[in-house]
Amino acid sequence: MWIQSLRLSKFRNYLSQNIEFNENINIFLGDNAQGKTNLLESIYYLANAKSFKSFRDKDLIMFNEKEMALDGLIRKNESFKNVKIRVNENKKEIFVNDIKYDKNKDLKSLFKLVLFTPEDLTIIKDGPNFRRNLIDDIIISVNFSYKALKKDFDKVLSQRNKVLKNQRSKYFKEELMAFDQQIIRLNYKIYRYREKYISLINTYAKKNHLNLTENKEDLSIIYRPDIVAKDIEEYREKFSKNLSDDLKYYRTTSGSQRDEIDIIINGKDSKKFGSQGQQRSAILNIKLANVNLIENTSQDKAIILFDDVFSELDEKRSNFLLENLGGFQTIITATNTKSLDRVDKSKIRKIKDGHIK
């Protein structure tokens, strides 16, 4: 599956732009603040009906304009899907082959993306929530029902914490009991999802890392759930034992929001002992595992987006990525071709002031 063409109208700094894409590698060069990331954001938005940069849809509309539009043509073998999104200050409309979609979740099944950003390269150094989010995003990319599960959990967790902050309420016990039933059920499901998919991700990431390091480094993703349980009853029992701490600290002190995910290289925690190069290699191979997982679970190929990532990589890692993504549509933005010497120059276009040449 690949994106054949895209039209941007009043999107960020693009007044009107038509783009035809190659089925394999596409490179867009430009200085900072010219529209490189905005281009990738438009493709991401077409696939997900949300931005990876902004929480508000109206922020995507060009300054002093009232509406933005995206029109993309997605191709799989000989079949085509035309995806249109219109956004103004009040609403968002999505059409696929001129049929209106009422829910964003319907859009996800049309085509899959894997996005690489410079921020990804620091995930190992950052807090555990960043690694949980990375794994959760990979799970969602192959099992979209997990997104609704996570959304429900986040909502119930927030509500339970509000109840814990209001312990003097005469309805406190009843409200807490009601939320306990919900949060235990949701927690246990998340625990099982993460357990299953981290095992799969680990298999692919380990293989990728061995290839990159020429069998010199072993990569492992270790899941350390806050609560380990063989069934939901055991989970309920262990969760309930933390009630005194919940009451003491006025918040939920146990559950999947406290799960840890360790990235281990040659038996050592890469956060503490890994070099910057090792950490970057590990994250790249985990993201590549996302590409592998999509291909092997959906029998389809993801579209790969690189937002100015190659400038952060050495020649060896850059070449490894390009070699491993040869069979995928890959859209790359960069400020120069320093790490892209092997790429056919005819595949390179330039971006300046929201115009692509």
Image (cartoon, helix red, strand yellow):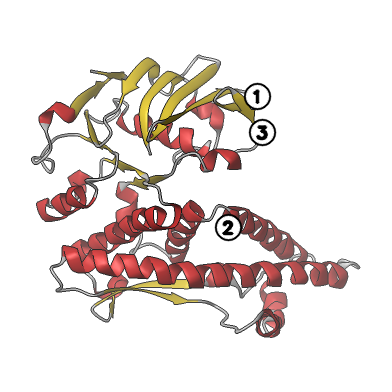
Query: Secondary structure under badge 2?
Result: helix
Q: CA distance from mark 2 to mark 3?
A: 20 Å
Looking at the image, residue 52 lies above or below residue 314: above
In front of the other: 278 or 44: 44
* Quadrant (top left, top right, bottom left, bottom right) of the C terminus: top left
Horizontally, is 294 left or right of 103 in the view? left
Report the amino acid beneath label 2.
Tyr
In front of the other: 59 or 36: 36
Q: CA distance from mark 3 to mark 1?
A: 15 Å
- Residue at (21%, 24%) from the top-left corner? 350
* Residue 248 placement (x, y as % from top left): 69, 77
- Residue at (62%, 74%) from the top-left corner? 253
Image quadrant where residue 292 sits: bottom left
- Residue at (25%, 40%) from the top-left corner? 308
Crowd tier of the residue under label 2, counting other residues whose Cα lies within 10 Å: few below 14, some 14–19, many 20 or above: some
Report the amino acid beneath label 3.
Asp
Check disc 2 and report the residue beneath it: 146
Q: Are marks 2 and 1 in contact (CB under 8 Å)?
A: no
* Residue 180 placement (x, y as % from top left): 75, 71
Q: How many marks?
A: 3
Query: Secondary structure under badge 1?
Result: loop
Query: Secondary structure under badge 3?
Result: loop
State the mark number for residue 90: 1
Check disc 3 and report the residue beneath it: 102
* Quadrant (top left, top right, bottom left, bottom right) of the N terminus: top left
* Residue 109 placement (x, y as % from top left): 52, 43
Horizontally, is 58 left or right of 346 in the view? right
Q: Is residue 122 visible?
A: no
* Residue 196 placement (x, y as % from top left): 49, 71
Report the amino acid beneath label 1.
Asn
Horizontally, is 172 left or right of 209 in the view? right
